[in-house]
Structure formats: structure tokens, C-alpha cells
Amino acid sequence: MSAIQAEVERRGMQIFDLVDRHPESIFSKAGFYQRMMEFSMRDEHFKVQMFRFVDVLASLRRGSDIVRHLDEYFADMRNGYAPLIRTGVSLARIVPIISGKFLRWNVSGMARQFIAGCNPGDVMKTLRKKRQQRIGFTVDLLGEAVVSEEEAAEYAERCQELLEHLARETRGWTDPLGKNSELFPVVNVSVKISALYSQMNPADPADAIAHLAPKLRPILRRAKELGAFINFDMESYAHKNATLELFCALFTEPEFRDWPHAGIVIQAYLRDAETDLRDLIAWGRARGTRFTVRLVKGAYWDYEKIKSTQNGWVIPVWLQKPESDANFEKLTRILLENESIVTSAFGSHNVRSIAYAQALAEELGIDRSRFEFQLLYGMAGPIKRALVDMGYRVREYSPVGELLPGMSYLVRRLLENTSNEGFLRAKFSEHVSAAQLLSDPRELMNGADNFATDSAAATANFSRNGATPEMPCDAYKNASLVNFVYPECQEKMRTALREVRAHFGQKYPLVIDGKEIWTDKLLKSVNPSAPDEIVGYVAEAGIPEAERAVKAARRAFETWARTPVEERCRLLERAAAILDRRRFELSAVEVFEVGKAWSEADGDIREAMDFCLFYAQQMRLIGYPRLTQNVPGEESYQHYWPRGVALVIAPWNFPVAILCGMVTAALVTGNAVIMKPAEPSAILGALLMEVFQEAGVPPGVLNCLHGRGSVIGAYLVDHPDVEMIAFTGSREVGLRIWESAGKTRPGQRELKRVVCEMGGKNAVIVDSDADLDETIVDTIYSAFGYQGQKCSACSRLIVLEENYERVMHRLLAAAASLRVGNPDQPGITVGPVIDETAYHRIQEIIEEGKTEATLAFQATNIPDKGYFIPPTIFTDVKPEMTLSQCEIFGPVLSVLKARDLDDAIRIANDTDYALTAGFFSRSPANIERIKAELVAGNVYVNRSCTGAVVGRHPFGGFKMSGGGTKAGGSDYLLNFLVPRVVTENNVAANFSGLRGKRTIDR
Ligand SMILES: Cc1cc2nc3c(=O)[nH]c(=O)nc-3n(C[C@H](O)[C@H](O)[C@H](O)COP(=O)(O)OP(=O)(O)OC[C@H]3O[C@@H](n4cnc5c(N)ncnc54)[C@H](O)[C@@H]3O)c2cc1C
């Protein structure tokens, strides 16, 4: 055993001895909280339901609401506690007011275990008590997620008040150790950076710093005057780099350069924590002034893992708990070895982690008064006491806030206390042996399989929709999104934007039969953010070129239809690889040509790649003959033939993805294709053609015709040699195509098949118990992301009367905080609408809207050049109004008030369309109703109603939204195929059958 391990064990045992004298009360068996924790640790499903209930409780107003939720959460409980809970619920039903009060009181009690006070005044009682126990404090202001600049300003103000209050109330307090006290001011405030700026965007740390620095400077200035300490807490990975950069930038400024009382958090569960810590130390040395690092493992492990998995990103956290533990120790060593410039604060409840820091400090000869241990208020009380008794410096992280905003903090703590892998549960609930708890994490790292995660168990429990867990699409792994949190990705995008701009004005030909064709007419494509900038030109096709394309496609079809499935699939896979190679370039063109924000543009390229890969995978599943039944004497198999020549007419709003999706579906199924990109996104269409040419599409199999829909589009739809039309676009054009394709013309041999996807008038309903943090952020994104120009966008928000004022207050403030501007800048959320026609049309609708409803909000600070429409919100909208019925396709949101859920569902369904719909609620029963009753092709619960992912959310609607086809779904390709069945009597060829026949003959 190494000397350090022996010392860790010795110290660990000493801590345990002290701890065991005062067992942890929150893990005892008495009391409401304790019983809840005990149940939760025994039953994962109960735990999930319990924490959901705690989360919703503060937003419920009436006793009857509380009882209803209790009933809904625990109704399907089938464990040992079920009778107990059912009896409780039955009693509660009889006297809901009293039961509501009782539960609220109990849950408030739980919250009070972790929240040190409701306000700065209230918290002093706790801090004074702790002072007597020789425990210091860092106070953190709890709050709802900050969704607007109004809320961010309030948070900054509260920080200032808190500082003043703490400084005033702690005057005369002295350092508990009386040694090296200059390193550890009494007043210590922990600041959440994301609470100071609502528009933090990982792609744009410079913008975050530009907005955060002016808000932080007065706080830091005042802290410096008052002799206080400010710590920057660390939140999700998306904000990590900006937080680190901000810290270094601010504390390098002359005003703060010599100020040593600043600290920041390093999260050991991150794989890049070591690099960040070394960079920070190098920065500190260059600066020449001490600073503090609070080393923690990290509070968002599940979130980071889920989010990265959903987006196909590299998971930034370690996946095995001992890896985080081991990294914590590695970083402890780096910190202590650099004690001359950095003061360490070890934020952990894990006795092994704590003992390691103690042992190492001893080995390095660092006095115990020169670093501190930080622990959370309400947790690990006996460990704090033991550390104090051993003469160490202890500081408690003390959250202050009201019950409602405090609930998410409470739930995080409950999860931490009940986590399968957490130290506290192991020690205080499961009584794991001290020797095990003190073992070296490096030795535990190999047993990867032993570390099943809480989240995996939770996911299993959450599959409660009756869906079979293993779906065919599960086998498909989506392409990744670019993670703009990485500076190298930001740089690649900036370079691509520069390079694309340098090639503005380039000309692109038509491609027919593999040949580049130029005509004497060129169509120009302009930048909607700056219409005097011409992104490029395309040759314009007329009827002769359309005719030539049909002939080329028909010829090519004969061979392509017989090309092996595998070869066709590989073409798509090569195209995906080329899209991946050119993704930054293509995204940059999207920014300029159609005004997409960076992440929206990247999402479009990712979706295009997904269509290629997903349809290739699907074609391999359906592309081979399949026996219909196993009967003796006969073989019957079904297989598919392509339809013929497919015309693809695509929209400009997902200029690469939708075009690519329809083209690849047609190609992989063996059809020859004529694609007509939308006029405003013609350059992107031309670039997609380049991709397929490079991928090796044979001449004539894919032809690219640019031109006016009214001329070549109409001609091709009616052409007798075009067998199918795949269209995505407006209802007006879609219906015309549907009708026209229904007529049989001379020379036509096939009934035309039309895949027709049109618009929506999508509604999102907000229930009275909805989580507003989530609701506001997701609704703003659904309504104003890509300027509301997604067919899936939320254009009607239906809010239950009971919640109306609360929702509207936050919604309007959030809309007012949006960044509107030229999307060539990284953090822009709202850019221009597509062209002048759209601009005028939307303006007219807004003007008309003003005559029928109340203009509740319209942004004012928008660029004066370009087709910018300010984000606009109307209230007092009634279901029959134009604002409720007509598709606007712009950044305009109509808000309708509903009496109750029945009313809300009726309003939501009262439209010609049925594309997407959303619902925010924490009531399981209401969620079930919505799933069954909302009339839409894609229904989203507790998330944005845009952003369908190929394979995961097959996309498309019905009624006037489309013909019920699902792009990106497992049955989409069937639209491009005709089924055939071939049956052969093989009795004569079968030896045993033959024998049987002869016998009968005799
Ligand atoms: C005073 C204080 C301040 C804090 N401030 C912050 C902050 O600003 N930002 C922040 O993010 N966190 C912060 N935390 C940390 C966080 O809230 C948790 O308290 C902490 O991670 C628990 O670690 P532990 O050492 O006490 O317990 P342990 O039980 O030893 O460790 C639990 C931790 O291990 C990690 N983990 C769990 N499962 C796995 C797995 N399968 N693979 C890899 N790692 C895993 C997680 O980080 C988990 O929280 C702070 C903690 C304290 C005490």
C-alpha cells in the first residue's frame, strides 16, 4: 500500500470515528423527509414520482389540485407502499384543504433542510448559528431560470442587496481559525453567471462576456470595498468556457487585477477539467495575484450525459463514478502543488476525497488553515462537525430563496442524497464499510459494468406509453450536431463565413443528364439580411430544359431501377460523407442565403446527412424480396418497384435537409429524379447537386432544374412522363399540385402519386401547473426560432386562465430580450424573413392583427436594413380571428386564453391544419388526454414543438398540413415504391412434394 493511501485511510477512519458519534439525521428513519428518502432509495419508480411531485407542488394553488396530482403520480404504484399511499390519497380527497396544507408544510420542511433562509434577513439566523459551530458561509441566491433581461437585472440587484446585508450583519465577525484569515473573507457570495444574462449562447462567448462584465463590475467593486469574496459557480458545460473566459477577463482588468478575493469552480467530472485548471493556474501566475478554485465533482452529470447523447456529441463527463473521484484527486494534487498562487476550496461530502486532500496537504507541508472544505447546507452535518473538530476550515454553501424557485434546487439535493453511486447514501443509508469507502478510486475504475447509472434505471421506468422499447429506428444512430461550445467549431464557422462571402456572386448551372447547362437567363439569390448582397446566380430553366430533363430522367430510370439496392444505398452514404466534409461551408451559405442562425443552419445540414444515412438503412430493410407466408408447395414473395420519374419540389426554409430528404428517398428507391430547389435557396440547391455529382450519381438519375415554380413546376407536375411528385411547401401550391396531379392526361401511363407536405397553425397549450422555466424558454424558441419560418413553429399559444398572468409576464419579458440581427453573428436568435414579399405580407398581417387583437409586444431594436420583422406577440386573440386561423410563417405569436383544458383542446384543434402541437404540464392525467386528443401529426409534451430528428420524430401532418406521410420515418420510402407480389407453384420442383403427388396419383 502506498504511503498516501495509508495516510488517506488513517485520516478517513479518524473522520468516520468522529462522524459515528453523531449519525446523520437526514438518513435516520424518523420523520416525513426521512421516510420519503427511505422509500425513494428502495424503489426507483417511487423516487421519480416523488421528486416530480415535489417539483410541481409549489406551483399548485388549491388543496384539490395537490390531491389530484398526488393521486396521478402514485396511482399506478405497485409496491409495498401502495396501500399506504392509496389510503393517504383517499383521506386527502375527503379533506383536500387540510391535506394540501399538510403536504405543503411537510415539503416546505424538506426544502428548509437544504435552503438556509427565505431572504437575506432570514438567513442570518442560520449563519449566526453556524458561526458558533465555527463554520463559515458562502451564500447563493436561488432563483428560477433567468429567461429575460428583466429577470437578470433583478438577480444583479438581489446580489448587491445580499452583499450589503451580509457585510452589515457580520461586522466584527472574525476568522474561526485566526490564521491566514486574509485569504478567507468572512462574507462570501456565490454567483450564478447564467442568472445575470438571459441570452448566453455557447457559440458566442464574446457576447456573453460583453453583457456580463458590465453587470458584474458593480458587484465586484462593491465586494472589494466591503472586503467580501465573490465566487463564480459553474453550471452546465454549455456555459463553462464563457464562465472561465469571463473570470479571466474581468480579473485581469486593472481595477481587479490585484484583488485576491475571487474564486471559480472546476468540475472534476469533466474530461477537460485538468486542461482548464492548468490554464487557470498559468493565467493566475501571469496575473500575479492569488485566486481561489473550488474543486467539485459536478452537479449536472445526468443532464450532460443525456443532452450529449441526444445531440450526438462527445459526452464531456466521465462515465464511471470512480473516474470522477480519481480526477478529483488528480486535480487536488495540481491545486495543492500550486498553492503559492491558488487557494483551494474542496467542495465534497465524500470522506475519501476529503481525506485525500488532507493527506496530500500534509505531505506537501501546507498548513491546514491555508485551504478550506466546503459542504452544502443541510447535508453531511456530521462530516462538517468532524472537520471542524480536526481543526480544518469549513465553509457551508447556503442557498437563500423562496420555496417556488427553490424546488429545483431541492430536487437536485434529493437526487444527490438518493443517488445509487453517491457517497452519502453509501455511508449513511447503506452502511458500506469504511474500508470500501476509503479505497483508491483508481482501483475501482476497471469494473465498468458495475456502474449502472441512475439515469438508465430512470429511463426504463419512464417508458410508460405502451410503446415497445425496441423499435426498428432504434438501430439508427443519428449524425451529430456541431457543438459550438468548442472554440475550434466557432472558428471553423467564422472561416467558412469569410470564405463563402469571398465567393459571393458565383454562377451555377442547371444539371441535366449529367451535363452542365447554361441558359441565357440567370436568377439571382440575395442575402435577406442585406438584400444588396448577391449570394450567387443560377441558370434559369424554361420549358425546353424541363422537357430535356424528363427525357434524361426517363432514360436513366431504366438502368437505375435495376441497379442493386446496395449500390443505391452506398450513393447516399457517400453523399452524407461529403455533406459532413462540407458542413461548415454549407451552413455558412445558409446563414447568407436564407438567414439562418448558426445552430439552425447546422441542424439543417445534420438533418440532410441523417436523411441520407437513415433512408439507406431503411432501404436495406425493405429493398429485398420478402416471403409473404411459409406454405408448402408455393413460394410467394413481395417486393417493390420504383415508380419512375419523380419530381421533387422543395421549400427554402430547410433548404438542404428537405430537398435532400425527398431526393434521397426517391433515389434510393430506384426512381430517377428532377429536383427543383426553391428560388430563394437556389444556391444551396446547386450545392446539393454538386454533392450528389461528387458522390457519383449516374447521368440523368438526378437532374437539377432552377426556375420559377409557376413555369417549370406547373409544366412538370402535369407532364405525362412524371410518375410522382414529392412536394413540401405552401398550402396554396400544395393543393394545386394535388388537384392537377389527379387528372389523367393523354399519354400518361401511371396514376401519379403525390407526397404533399404543407403548413401548420401549430398550437402550444400551457397547463395551470406547467413548469414555467421550461415553458417560456421552449415557447420562445418554438415561436421565434428561425423567425417563425418553420412549418412546425408555434404560432398560437393557448394559456389556461389560471396561469395566464404569470405566463404572460415572463413570456413578454423573454421576447423583449431576444437578440435580433444579422445571423452571421454567432449568438443571434432572430434573423430576417426570407424575402421582400414575405416581409410585406407579414407586415400586412401584423397591421390587420392590430385591428382585431391587442399588440402586447413588438421588438423595437432591429436592424434598419434587410427583411427584419420584429418579434411580435398579440394577446386577446379569439379562435375565429385571422391571427388564429391563417398561417403567418413569420415571428408572430398569437396568445389565446382558455377557461380550462377542454376549452384549450377545442381551440387548439379548431384549425384547418394538423401538423405539430405542444403541451406543457406536470399532470400525468392531462398529459394522457393531450396525447389522445390533440389533432396533429407530431405532438410534443414538455418540450419545443420544433426540431424533429430523423428516425426519432418522423415528421408530417394531416388535414391541410399534408397527406399523412412521415418524412424520416420507417414507412416513408413506401411512398416512392409500388409493391409487387410474385407467386410460384413449386410443388413440381420439390422432391418430397413430387413423391406425395405420385402417391396420390396412384
Ligand atoms: C460547497 C459546494 C459547492 C458546489 N458548487 C458546485 C458548482 O458550482 N457547480 C457544480 O457543478 N457542482 C457544485 N457542487 C457539486 C455538486 O453539487 C455535488 O455536491 C457533488 O458533485 C457531490 O460530490 P461528492 O464528492 O460530495 O459526492 P460523491 O458521492 O463522491 O460524488 C457524486 C458525484 O460523482 C459524479 N458522478 C456520479 N455518477 C457518476 C458516473 N457514473 N460517472 C462519473 N461521475 C459520476 C457526479 O458529479 C456526482 O455529483 C458543489 C458542491 C459543494 C459541496
Image (spheres, rainbow, N blue to C red):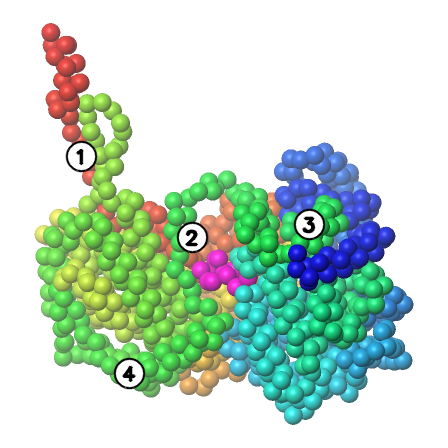
- Label 3 to label 4, Cα distance in Å? 64 Å
Is 355 part of what is drawn in magenta? no
Residue 479 in sight: yes
Which of the two discs, 4 and 2, labels the residue nearer the N terminus?
Answer: 4
Circle number at residue 952? 2
Which residue, given by chain and number where applicable, does mark 4 sit on? 503
Q: Which residue is mark 1?
A: 982
Q: Which residues are magenta?
A: 307-317
Q: Nearer the viewer, residue 658 or 346?
A: 346
CA–CA distance in space, label 4 to label 2: 37 Å
Magenta residue check for 313: yes
Q: Contact (CB < 8 A) between labels 1 and 3?
A: no
Crowdedness of circle 1 by 10 Å Cα count: few (<14), some, many (20+)? few
Looking at marks 4 and 1 on the same chain, the residue that comes earlier in the sequence is marked by 4
Residue at 65% x, 49% y: name it. Answer: 420
Q: Which mark is residue 226?
A: none
Q: In the rendered structure, which amino acid carries the disc numbered 3?
A: Gln
Q: Residue at x 85, y 74 (%)?
A: 177
Residue identifier under label 3: 436
Furthest-bottom residue in view? 254
